[in-house]
Image: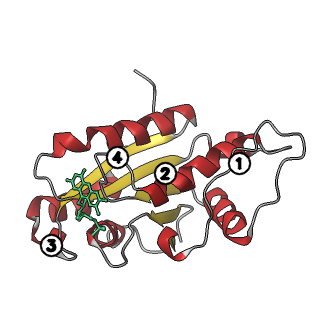
């Protein structure tokens, strides 16, 4: 058993898609005993984030929000597995990350201190063959890690449109094998 614990946050709006396939290819290479927790945002009933940060009475988290917050805090490594949607993160993924802003500022929260030093990773499938077009998503995750004083392991990219097509992307399959073994430096704003 290692002391690492990976939370895979699936952000596609379909199940069993390319992003999940690629994330599972990478996860297969994790050392034996590494804990893995997989959460499919599309299967959760997390409502849209309501910005109550500056309201005196705060808010009471629903069941899905509480589960996600707990799962996030339990992980040493958070893997955002989002397809590329309009050159950015999917809406499901973005909504989950929006909740981080709430968790950062809820009364008595230690979310910021506890997340600092942990590692953020990304896994993304995209239909386009030009990976430079995923730059917006990569920057968004990198800057999120920098803001949170987290390490950033980068984004594993794979090509595919129909579900399963990413398996034909040999370069992605090779990269998946080494992805979680690579260095994840502390993220810093440029
Ligand atoms: C709403 C939507 C927006 C998309 N936008 C892009 C895009 O900007 N660039 C791209 O290369 N592919 C885009 N795609 C294609 C998906 O990234 C591609 O089908 C990917 O394999 C989906 O991943 P999934 O199978 O994990 O859902 C888009 C697909 C959808 C449904």
Q: To which residue does mark 3 refer? A: 165
Q: Secondary structure at mark 4?
A: loop
Q: Is residue 132 above or below residue 176?
A: above
Left or right: residue 135 versus residue 190 is left
Specify which label sits upstream in the sequence, 2 or 3: 2
Left or right: residue 118 versus residue 136 is right
Name the mark on residue 138. Answer: none
Q: To which residue does mark 4 refer? A: 88
Q: To which residue does mark 2 refer? A: 94
Q: In this view, which residue lies farthest toward the right? A: 57
Q: Secondary structure at mark 1?
A: helix
Q: Secondary structure at mark 3?
A: helix
Tell me how far mark 3 sits from mark 4, CA to CA.
Answer: 20 Å
Tell me how far mark 1 sits from mark 2, CA to CA.
Answer: 14 Å
Q: To which residue does mark 1 refer? A: 103
Do the numbered discs 1 and 3 sit on residues whose CB atoms are within 8 Å?
no
């Amino acid at each position: 058993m290692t002391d690492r614990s990976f939370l895979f946050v699936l952000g596609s709006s379909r199940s069993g898609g390319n992003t999940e396939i690629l994330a599972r290819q990478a996860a297969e290479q994790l050392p034996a005993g590494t804990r893995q927790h997989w959460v499919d945002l599309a299967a959760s009933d997390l409502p849209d984030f309501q910005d109550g940060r500056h309201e005196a009475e705060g808010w009471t988290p629903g069941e899905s929000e509480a589960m996600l917050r707990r799962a996030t805090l339990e992980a040493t490594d958070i893997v955002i597995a989002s397809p590329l949607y309009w050159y950015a993160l999917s809406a499901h993924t973005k909504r989950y990350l929006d909740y981080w802003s709430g968790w950062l500022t809820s009364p008595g929260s230690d979310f910021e201190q506890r997340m600092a030093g942990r590692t953020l990773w990304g896994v993304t499938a995209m239909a386009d063959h030009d990976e430079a077009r995923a730059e917006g998503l990569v920057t968004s995750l990198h800057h999120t890690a920098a803001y949170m004083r987290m390490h950033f392991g980068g984004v594993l990219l794979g090509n595919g449109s129909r579900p399963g097509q990413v398996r034909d992307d040999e370069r992605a399959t090779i990269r998946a094998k080494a992805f979680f073994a690579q260095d994840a430096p502390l993220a810093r704003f440029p």
